[in-house]
Amino acid sequence: MAATALELLAFGLFAAVTLGSALGVVLVRDVWHAALLLGVALLSVAVHFVMLQAEFLAAMQVLVYVGGVLILISFAVMLVSREDARPDIGTNPQLKLGAHLGRGLAAVALFAVLAWVVLRAGLGAPAGFPAEAEITRSIGYAMFNLDGGNVPAEGFLATFEIIDVVLVAALVAAVMLARRESGGGVLGALRGDGGRERGGDER
Amino acid sequence: MIPTAYYVLLGAAVFCIGAFGILTRRNALMFLISVELMLNGANVNLVAFSQYHGNLTGQTFGLFTLALAAAEVAVGIGIVLVLFRNFDDVDVTDAVTMRW
């Protein structure tokens, strides 16, 4: 099934948004602006997911990334910002040609190799999912090794349980990292002066 | 349907942009943000090949990638806060006490 002109137009527009905001993320000097541009990039990736017939994943992308990860990142940006931040830094994207030239060339070379491999692979038209496919329901069955869905997938029960343990470990680790060593008080960085005064935690 | 190669190229481009961010920036928060970009590029690949084969393995694995990214950010933010507390900055080149 060939792509219609409208599909190609939509893909082109949103690919431009994704690439533009991703470039903006790595090129703006201000971390807060980078975090906001990351939100734009993540939302446009969610649009790509919808066009790839992954509606459930698109919803999860918006919920987990834009609703969770982005909030966490902006939270951290607020916590580690300082009063003596440099207001002379503008908000425009900046490319330091001298210092960034080698690294930029390395990234471009990596992309060139990847693109060469992809274009040589000769991927044909995608098979896609039939109209009667119940994608979200099949994902749910695949996660628990059950044979209920009408779309083929591997079973992921072991992965599901391992991710379960990893999430708990990560949350415990985050709480451990946020505690002060001496007083044992929880989340010293969240109190009062934002944890700026070192040693000011024996309250 | 859009040819799968376009999506794979898009994912590769987002991945390389994230790699460029990690190579050039010194702010620990920018490292986290760039890693998020790279994970998203990989996720686009997974979902694109899921559609290419008409098989849901890629989409299910993409969900797990989402969960891991959330866990990674939770730990990463904790590390950034500790870095800020100990060195009064989030510049990764400031943390030199573990060097020998």
Image (cartoon, coloured by chain):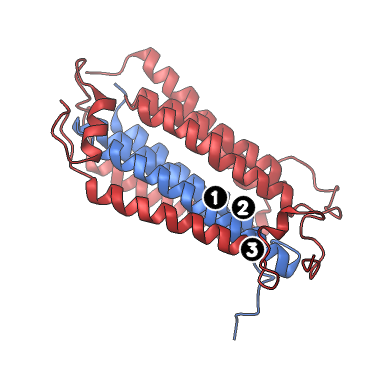
Chain colours: A red, B blue
Which of the two residues, A97 or B37, is positioned nearer the viewer here?
B37
The Cα–Cα distance between marks 3 and 1, rounded to whole angstroms, is 26 Å
- Can see residue B44? yes
Q: Which is in the foreground here, disc 3 or disc 2?
A: 3
Total count of labels: 3
Quarter containing the N terminus of chain A: top left
Tell me the chain of label 3: A
Q: Residues within 10 Å of mark 1 (few under 14, many from 20)?
A: many
The Cα–Cα distance between marks 3 and 2, rounded to whole angstroms, is 23 Å
Task: Report helix, strand or loop for mark 3.
Answer: loop
Q: Amino acid at mark 2?
A: Met
Q: Residue at x 51, y 35 (%)?
A: A42
**Badges 1 and 2: C-beta atoms under 8 Å apart?**
yes
Residue labelled with disc 2: B30
Quarter containing the C terminus of chain A: bottom right
- Can see residue B26? no
Which of the two residues, B50 or B73, is positioned nearer the viewer here?
B73
Residue labelled with disc 1: B34
Q: Residues within 10 Å of mark 3 (few under 14, many from 20)?
A: some
Tell me the chain of label 1: B
Instruction: Tell me where residue B63 appears, x and y as whole percent.
Output: 36, 40
**On residue B93, which mark appears?**
none
Q: Amino acid at mark 3?
A: Arg
Q: Residue at x 36, y 49 (%)?
A: A114
**Badges 3 and 1: C-beta atoms under 8 Å apart?**
no
The Cα–Cα distance between marks 1 and 2, rounded to whole angstroms, is 6 Å
Residue labelled with disc 3: A179
Instruction: Tell me where residue A128 appears, x and y as whole percent.
Output: 22, 25
